[in-house]
Image (tube, rainbow, N blue to C red):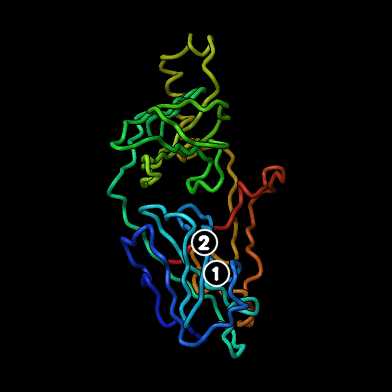
Amino acid sequence: MNIVLRTNPVHRAEKVPVDIILEVYFKIDINVDTLSPQTIVLLNVDAQKGEPFSYEYRNKVLLIQPAAKLSPLAHYQVELVGGEEGLKDIMGRLLDQSFMMEFYTADIKDIKPPVVTAPSHLSSVANPVTFKWNAAERAYFYELEISRSNTFDVLVWPRGDSRVYGTEVTPETALEEGSYYARIRSVNDAGTRSAYSSIIQIHVRPPVTAQSTDTAGTGANAQDELDHLKDQLGGTPEQGLDTLGIASMTPADQEVNVPLSFGITSSPLSEIVLEFDEDLDLSTVDSKSFYVIAQKN
């Protein structure tokens, strides 16, 4: 049963103010005992993380107040959970399936993100890595984030306070060899945060040694470096290189209208199955190498 009358902002709205109080209008009164942080979800889709909020319900209207200003130029999703453990009206009737509404926030006019000048996008750099950027007007300090994932759901750096008052920083802990993503934003003296800068992707190498310095600049070494960078940042594997492939998937890749597990279908989806063409090294299987991202189109 659809019990939502309308929302503010409307579904797929753009340029939504970052300080908005979200409103959901219902056709019939909701059982307030079924309203909770488990049945109301505010998700930052870009970062794939929930946003903290408070809520108030009165006169068939649910008001959702984010705990802090939303990120500018970001994609958000509000979900009201349905099913047996979800929302119910005052007659005890279920919201038979989850209700979702999406919107996109506006940019901040007062402050803009800096432009990262080093390292460059898709470059290979040796430890220690120094990040540099141009100063942004009215910026009091900057917040740099480094992650293994382009969603930045788990940060490699910083581990604590991320304030940087200059225009460059070298993480105090050397980054392990591998691929990384980085982005930065400005914060003014009133605490207003800009949108994030464009994301850069880099590959980090071990520190340069005397031996590697002696061979640097040779044609063979430069080609080896290029081939290595292509492999690490998504280049095509060379012929003859053993690679792991996926033989089949259930549901199939890009399959739509997959039944959900709300108890309203005869065969709800209970698991996602991947069949590989070779045995996996189980020590490489964890939440960093396999994860599910929910995004409503």
Q: Which residue is mark 2?
A: 53
Q: x%, y% of residue 235?
A: 45, 39
Residue 121, image quadrant: top left
Say which quadrant the C terminus sits in. bottom left
The answer to whether residue 136 is above or below residue 106 is: above
**CB atoms at circles 1 and 2 under 8 Å apart?**
yes
Does residue 204 appear in the picture of this structure? yes
Residue at the spot 49% in from the left edge and 84% down from the top edge = 3
Residue at the spot 49% in from the left edge and 57% down from the top edge = 67
The answer to whether residue 265 is above or below residue 77 is: below
Q: Which of marks 2 and 1 precedes in the sequence?
A: 1
Does residue 238 appear in the picture of this structure? no
Q: Which residue is mark 1?
A: 40
Amino acid type, residue under disc 1 in the picture: Ile
Q: Is residue 88 left or right of residue 132?
A: right
The answer to whether residue 275 is above or below residue 165 is: below
Q: Give the distance between the C-alpha atoms of the residues marked 1 and 2, in whole angstroms.
A: 10 Å
Amino acid type, residue under disc 2 in the picture: Phe
Q: x%, y% of residue 178?
A: 54, 33
The answer to whether residue 203 is above or below residue 41 is: above
Residue 131, image quadrant: top left
As drawn, the residue found furthest toward the right would be 282
Q: Which mark is residue 3?
A: none
Q: x%, y% of residue 81?
A: 56, 73
Q: Nearer the viewer, residue 122 or 222?
A: 122
Residue at the spot 46% in from the left edge and 41% down from the top edge = 234
